Image (cartoon, helix red, strand yellow):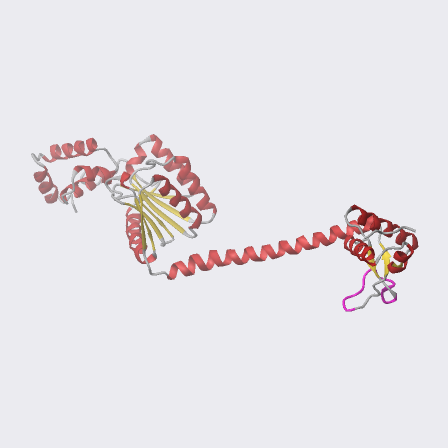
Amino acid sequence: MIKGSGGAGTQSTDLALTLYRQLRARGASSMRQVASDMDLSEDDLARCREELIGLGLVVRTGQLHASRLEPEPGETAETDVVTVIAPEIALLRLLERERTRLRNHLEQADRAHHTLKTLAGNFLRTETLAQAVGVEIEILRDYRRIQQVLEDITVTVQGNLASMHPIARGREIPERALDRDRRQIEKGVQVRSIFSQRLTSVPEDAEHLRMKAKLGVQVRLSPVVPMNMIIADEQFALLPVDPEDGSAGAILARGSALVRSYQTLFEHCWHTATPYGEQVLPARGGDGLSEQQRAALRMLASGMKDEKVARSLGVSLRTVSRMISELMQELGASSRFELGVRAARLGWLD
């Protein structure tokens, strides 16, 4: 006889192991009868039964399921009569149950992920934002915050990204800008960018434009790009606080009611710009003026100062002064006012 002391831990496990061996030696039999032969207490029997059933080493059985290891749903088993399962079989069955449980959890996780993706991707971005009429403005002074906003736009943009750049790279690392282009295009976003046509004459800038076009960015060139501007899905717009001072910070505008106006400005500039690769240099009209010279004349005639003309054309102040001197000499003008009058008479400002 093996007497149980009612102890827990290792001693309880030893009793369960001994009981299992006795049951295995006898085959299908009453657990209570075997426990009685071992002189186990009711508490010891309860603990051993719970441990062995939990490990899958014994299953309840009886006449109703003599040909099955476990009762069917709704059947009542004789709880004292059990049959013994070999340890390796019990292990395999336990692994299969765990595999099934994990598979069910994965299916639930996949359904939850699909639900969240549908809600966030289709409804939150396209329904909630598209129907929003409110406008929110945030002034960004810190350069790191501006870079984070650019990353946020890259993540959230779904359909269209439009941008204008008087200069090709500015303060940003070129590789970082190209990486954002790549990620956006891989998502299926239409990316369009307008740059100053002067950039094609600067080797580093020309290479940057070539790489953007190679990635799939739709690039166009214009003699005049009014300011930096980025528009995402007609919901977000990033604009300079001061178009004449790039270090002054940026404005982040949210809300289609405002952003649509900036989108209209972009579309006008886009349709008047030349597709990258189709530009003809030097671009001169019948009057012998290049597009850049013609743009400079129009801006000067409107009263724009040389500094602003230089920023709009993306050239240096010295280049603007040289262009003006060349034009005055060509028309025989002794002053800027006279230059404007003669240019107007010749129809150069039309």
Above or below for 169 versus 35: above
* Horizontal relation, residue 158 to residue 94: left or right: left
The spot of residue 146 in percent (x, y) is: 35, 43
Above or below for 157 versus 280: below
* Horizontal relation, residue 332 to residue 184: left or right: left
Above or below for 289 versus 156: above
**Residue 294 part of the magenta-drawn span:** no
Q: Looking at the image, which residue is at 34% across and 30% down?
A: 203
**Residue 66 part of the magenta-drawn span:** yes
The spot of residue 315 in percent (x, y) is: 24, 35
Decide which of 162, 240 is in the foreground and name it.
Answer: 240
The spot of residue 79 in percent (x, y) is: 83, 63
Can residue 293 be seen in this snapshot? no
Decide which of 82, 198 is in the foreground and name it.
Answer: 82
* Horizontal relation, residue 39 to residue 176: left or right: right
The secondary structure making up most of the magenta span is: loop
**Residues rendered magenta in the picture:** 63-74
Q: Looking at the image, which residue is at 90% across and 52% down?
A: 22
Quarter-of-image position of residue 195 = top left
Q: Looking at the image, which residue is at 71% across and 52% down?
A: 98
Can residue 156 be seen in this snapshot? yes
Decide which of 307, 20 is in the foreground and name it.
Answer: 20
The spot of residue 264 in percent (x, y) is: 29, 54
Number of numbered discs on residues:
0
